[in-house]
Image (spheres, grey):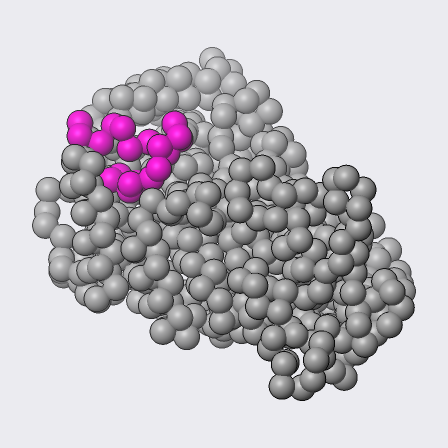
Amino acid sequence: MTRTCFLLAAAAWLLSALINQPVSAASRGDEPAAPANQVAFINQQIESAWQDRGLTPSRPAEDGAWCRRVYLDLLGRVPSVNELEQFVRDRSDDKKAKLVDRLLGEEYLAEYARNWTTEWTNLLVGRTGGATRDSLVSRAGTRQYLRRSFQKNKPADVMMRELVTATGSCQPGDADFNGAANFLADKLADNGVQATAKTSQIFLGMAVQCTQCHNHPFNEYKQNQFWEMNAFFRQTRLEPIRVARNQRVARIVNRDFAGEGGDPAKAELYYELRNGKLKVAYPVFVDGTSLVSLHADRGEDFGDSGYLSDVNRREELANLIAASDEFPRAMVNRVWGHFLGYGFTKPVDDMGPHNAPSHPELLDYLASEFRTSSFNLKELMRWIVLSDAYGLSSRAARGNESDDPALGAKPLFSRFYLRQMQAEQLYESLLVATRADESLDYAKREQMKEDWLAQFNTAFGNDENGEATTFNGSIPQALMLMNGDLIKQATECKEGSFLHQVATNPRLGNAKKIQLLYLAALARDPAKEELAISNRILQAREGDVPAALQDVWWALLNTNEFILNH
């Protein structure tokens, strides 16, 4: 039998067995009490919504499933077998809290910062920002700024201010390098229309992009509000672009804004209504606060000045965002959505009266607590991952089949919603599961990942800056997973690899070797039927244990259960 036939047979046998296995099984043990007031309030609010709708939640997830989940969500990769076994063997009541403390602490700081750098790089500049020669964004500069910010656990409001008000060069190595400038670098064309839309979307949770041309047909956002928000960016300029190392380099500067009437003392802008008439706009925040009202004590209309010596409009905007109710709500909604699969609104960045949150009191409470914590992102994450909702099984119960946001329902979080790993998580998880490329430094690892992701995201058809990605089983996806270079590298039984260490260990029986492969890939032991199938593969290989285990390993890494966050 050829190698290809063995691989196909292994995949068919194991996949058929996995179809009937729950993605995560239920634990019958009691969960420890919530360790903080915030966690207790989350639990109370979520449970109250279940009771109101007559839902029975799924049971708590198995320890292995929860451990895999929290590593994926906090660090962006699955746990190693040693990390998994250390958690599962811990019998203390506060084992989850202790693990979260470790994952958010110094021991895993580099991985934590790398994961959230990836998340926010994609959010701020997209997956392709800085990836092409004609891009104004330095992807390396963006990552450097974000990585250092997350290493310091920089408060979310400080990051927001730095991103919204940034000046300087986007390119590392320049004397005035400021990695935060990359957020706006490619969004200042067309008088900052994209800067207006993305700032509102990310930091206020408001989808206003279509209101630049007309009032929104389905929500309360008006055209004048878009251009009043846009007026805050009119002092912002891109200096003449130079070329360095075949890459265009942008520099953001502040300049006086003369207004479209030519008078910086009254720096107005005009926008066109659908009937062709022009209307004037000055800087006014989304809550109706104008710079004129903020600076009323400095003279009539002082706040409309375009002179930087009078008013720095972006700094004023950052102050207004930080003081607003929308900012902490938007941040909480986004972070909650990262961990639970859905935010309190769908999508997470379209909030407002037109799109009521599923749990309004909980959202308001967490926003208030987030502000009280000085916008501490790690604390917000801790509250969420220690909640009962985050700890539920992904297997639906008889009483909660209707809780399915994928079918349009508001999320009630009565079970953990299955979702595909992000491309970056899959890459990192394959490296951890197989112990590949452990000797590479950070820069080389990141470059290899970027090269692989460029192909992966094309084949997987991801939308730029999309809120979620979905594995849909398309032919390009299947071919990439089954035949891509990374999978080939990950399943090689070469000396030093995880597979080689397992396959050639004389102290381990075949059943134990198979168990270790399942733990590494799926964070669980094989079921009896799966173990029997694996043994048949061993028999078919006529004693060639490394080759047989390679077949099993390849099949496991190509299962939906490995690809899914469950």
Nearer to us in this view, 18 or 247: 247
Q: Quadrant of the C terminus?
A: top left
Does 401 appear in magenta?
yes
Q: Position of residue 384 (x, y in %)?
A: 31, 56
Nearer to us in this view, 517 or 318: 318
Which image quarter: residue 90? Answer: bottom left
Q: Residue at x 83, y 56 (%)?
A: 247
Q: Position of residue 374 (x, y in %)?
A: 41, 75
| Residue 429 visible in the shown view | no
Q: Is residue 84 above or below residue 310?
A: above
Q: Residue at x 17, y 27 (%)?
A: 398
Q: Pick out the residue farthest to the top.
A: 1
Q: Position of residue 75 (x, y in %)?
A: 43, 56
Q: Residue at x 66, y 49 (%)?
A: 223
| Residue 143 visible in the shown view | yes
Nearer to us in this view, 248 or 18: 248
Q: Residue at x 26, y 39 (%)?
A: 415
Overall secondary structure of the magenta section: loop
Nearer to us in this view, 421 or 451: 421
Q: Pick out the residue farthest to the bottom.
A: 298
Q: Which region of the structure is painted magenta?
A: 398-416
Does 317 appear in magenta?
no
Count of numbered marks: 0
**Left or right placement of residue 394 versus residue 325 in this view:** left
Q: Position of residue 199 (x, y in %)?
A: 61, 58
Q: Is residue 135 above or below residue 298?
A: above
